[in-house]
Amino acid sequence: MRKENQYRITVEEIGVAEGLVPQRLQFEMQDREDLFSAVEKINENSGLAAPEATRVAVALRLLGPVMMLNRKHELFAEFMPHFKTFMQNLKNTVKGKR
């Protein structure tokens, strides 16, 4: 059995007006993929600027597993084929530049 990687994700609001309390959310997740390795590969090989590549990698690792678990859910049913194609293209792009 494959070991799950465990992560704590924290999002903090910055640049809030004086006197307001910044909002914060935090959650934990498990993923079969190494999030940091995914970020590194996409940063190195996607052709995107580092901040955007990092955001894409994190977003995909957050969304992808949820979609896979719920692929028949009406929220994801129409999007799933497009997501699969996107992921295949991304993987080919990242692998092809090595």
Image: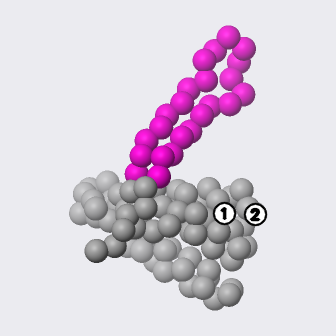
Q: Is residue 63 left or right of 23 when viewed as pictured? A: left
Give the extent of the magenta segment: 7-29
Q: Which residue occupies 54% across, 80% down? A: 91
Mark identifier at residue 53: 1
Q: Is residue 7 left or right of residue 44?
A: left
The amino acid at mark 2 is Ala
Viewer-nearest residue: 73 or 37: 37
Is residue 18 inside the magenta stretch? Answer: yes
- SS category of the residue bearing label 1: helix
Q: Position of residue 69 (x, y in %)?
A: 28, 62
Where in the figure is residue 59, as x and y percent of width and height? 52, 56
Image quarter of residue 54: bottom right
**Residue at image point 48% right, 61% down:** 61
Q: Residue at x 72, y 14 (%)?
A: 18
Whole-angstrom CA distance, mark 2 to mark 1, is: 6 Å
Tag 2 secondary structure: loop
Q: Position of residue 87 (x, y in %)?
A: 49, 74
* Residue furthest right as drawn: 49
Would you call the spot at circle 2 few (<14 residues within 10 Å), some (14-19), or many (20 or more)? few
Q: Can residue 29 be seen in the rendering of this structure?
A: yes
Q: Which image quarter holds the N terminus?
A: bottom left
Which of the 4 quarters of the picture holds residue 65? bottom left
- Residue contact at pointers 2 and 1, CB within 8 angstroms: yes
